[in-house]
Image (cartoon, grey):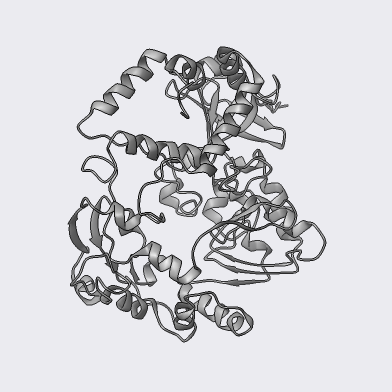
Amino acid sequence: TLVADWSPERAAPLAGIDAPDITRMAREFGAAEAAVAYARIGVCHHTTGTITHWLVQVLNAVTGNLDRPGGQMFSTPPVDVPWLLRTVAGASGRDRYRSRVRGLSELGGELPVAGLADEILTPGDGQVRAMIVHAGNPCRSAPESGRMEQAFASLDFMVSVDLYVTETSRHADVILPPVSHLERSEFDVVFPYLGVRNNARYSPAVFDKPDGAKDDWEILAGIAAEVAPGANLPRGSWLLRALTSGASPDVISRGLVASGPQGVLRKGPSGLTLGKVKKTRGGIDLGPLETGRLRHVLRTDDNRVQLAPPLLMDEVATVLAGRAGRSQDDGEAGAELQAGRAGDEYDLQLIGRRHLRSNNSWLHNVEAMVKGRDRCTALMHPDDTAARGIAEGDRVVVTSPNGSIEVPVEVSDEIRRGVVAIPHGWGHDVKDVGWSTAAAHPGANVNELTDAMLLDRLSGNGALNATWVRVERAAVEVALGT
């Protein structure tokens, strides 16, 4: 019913893919012995991120590729992470409460960061006047980062847990530095849950930590111990109490792993102990993913896959109604989307991208990772650069209704016409912040262009890949000699 009116011919101008190609790919996918479709963070950061991810799962389901070799499968991790999260934080939910200023919906116990600047800057009962920031850099990573910078500068008190003085932690009254990555041990709880093979891995510390240095968990446990006595602890507060009593991650991990199939593991591999994992160099390979795991990850009342939840169906109807309302002709609608919704002044759509040597901003203070060519560039199609008189390597000014940045251009026919891609995580242009290597390769902060008012309504994620911009060649300064 949802897609009945959407023929390949109707979808083609919006997708930028010819109708016969859409038909061919659909038939090949449906007839394949095994196939899988997946989407990642680029889709998340859009106004339709939630429904697009849902429809990807629907495609896998209706073609028989859920819980099937070669299709979408589910791991058997050493620790049942979703169960653990529900135990610690309680059952997840949506819209149980809303943010004070913009009325943004809660999701899983969290409020959208796109509303944080308003919560700090808007006076009144419940105004945020103090912050604890652990490792994050919202003054660069959040939409409309210039306003976020203003908000953090106005706080009465701030604590930052970070290795560096960053664009965000420079606003802190107290910076608590944890040990470095090579000075701590870790039993990997999260990534085996996402693995393409079942595994268990323990990474021992390479170096002894200096006297007086603390792990992240020790710092956070110390803060929690101060806060907990006056707090209403959530269900599962046994874990918080364990942390605040000085129980190390090793002690807690040993309990989680040793609980066996009937304990915390419940649906994980039996006969596994933390000691066995520690003794196995490089970790333990627990074998390929197995079928039958789907029933263990489902959280539905009837233990069946719900392909058409009303909330998501209603959101699709809202999106389609809005799109149909702009034009009765889908060809015109497609042209309008390509031209830009903010009018002719902003005619390119901005998306993000990543490099292998640049994960967000984590690696920008490592010389080996930032040396060589500039990676903070605007990637554009040759037709778009030619129309603007721009050549490879030229510096351009990229402008949105919220601001402007200047970056060099890369030209490639591998990017779609009408789109410009600039990596996120850059903009280390604040002097004396303490990470000198990053400051020597500042790049530009793409979130000076994004709009904090533009969100995925269901998840609250900022629509960082939905910004309409214009690109112009930067003015060239010429130095005249005498």
Q: Residue shown at 54%/47% (left/top)?
A: 425
Residue 396 against residue 36 in the figure, above or below? above
Task: Quadrant for residue 330, please give it.
Answer: top right
Report the number of numbered marks.
0
Q: Residue shown at 71%/22% (left/top)?
A: 345
**Residue 375 is at least partly visible in this image:** no
Question: Picture coordinates of residue 58 (x, y %)?
Answer: 39, 37
125 sits to left or right of 286 = right
Q: Residue shown at 71%/59% (left/top)?
A: 152
Q: Residue shown at 63%/29% (left/top)?
A: 468
Q: Nearer the viewer, residue 91 or 212?
A: 91
Residue 429 against residue 91 in the figure, above or below? above
Q: Nearer the viewer, residue 453 or 90?
A: 90
301 sits to left or right of 148 = left
Question: Picture coordinates of residue 236 (x, y %)?
Answer: 47, 75
Question: Picture coordinates of residue 41 (x, y %)?
Answer: 46, 43
Residue placed furthest toward the right: 124
90 sits to left or right of 431 = left
**Residue 251 is at least partly visible in this image:** yes
Question: Picture coordinates of residue 187 (x, y %)?
Answer: 32, 69
Q: Nearer the viewer, residue 258 or 277?
A: 258
Q: Quadrant of the C terminus?
A: top right
Task: Quadrant for residue 22, please give it.
Answer: top left
